[in-house]
Amino acid sequence: MEDYMLKTKQDVSNFLKEKKISPTSQRVEMLHKLLNKSQHLSPEVIYKMVNDEFPKVSRATVYNNLNLFIENGIVRKLS
């Protein structure tokens, strides 16, 4: 994926729309954080990062959205 073109949250939102994924605030925030970090992030770290912006986001939301991104080839799961 050409993440260098997805630097802003608006870029991320447009990208999700192109993938036919509703660009909810939480999804945009998660993907923006994922794409703008140089290291691999665990779901727990992502949860904590997103929770700073969205205090009511649940772990289930983070895991469900990560799985959605994986299913659509946006991110890869590392074991």
Image (cartoon, rainbow, N blue to C red):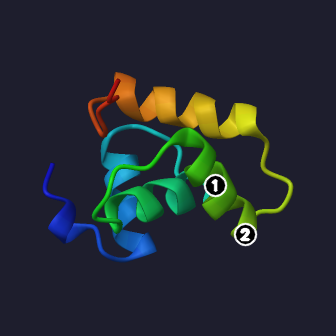
> Looking at this view, is 35 or 21 the one in front?
35
Quadrant of residue 3 within the rendered picture? bottom left
Circle 2 residues within 10 Å: few <14, some 14–19, many ≥20: few
Q: Position of residue 59 (x, y in %)?
A: 73, 38
Quadrant of residue 60 within the rendered picture? top right
Q: Which mark, residue 26?
A: 1
| Label located before the other in sequence (2 or 1) | 1
Residue denoted by label 2: 52
Q: Residue at x 28, y 64 (%)?
A: 38
Of the two numbered discs 2 and 1 in the rendering, the one whose residue sits closer to the viewer: 2
Using the image, determine if residue 22 lies above or below residue 9.
Answer: above
Q: How far apart are the alpha carbons under marks 2 and 1?
A: 11 Å
Whether residue 39 is visible here, answered yes or no, is: yes
- Judge from the rendering whether residue 38 lies leftward or rightward of residue 67; answer left or right: left
Q: Residue at x 33, y 60 (%)?
A: 35
Q: Position of residue 65 (x, y in %)?
A: 55, 36
Q: Residue at x 50, y 35 (%)?
A: 66
Whether residue 13 is visible here, answered yes or no, is: no
Q: Position of residue 16 (x, y in %)?
A: 39, 49
Q: Amino acid at mark 2?
A: Asp
For the residue labelled by badge 1, is the local secondary structure a helix, a strand or a loop? helix
Q: Residue at x 51, y 58 (%)?
A: 28
Number of marks: 2
- Judge from the rendering whether residue 57 lies leftward or rightward of residue 49; answer left or right: right
Which corner quadrant holds the C terminus? top left
Q: Amino acid at mark 1?
A: Gln
Circle 1 residues within 10 Å: few <14, some 14–19, many ≥20: some
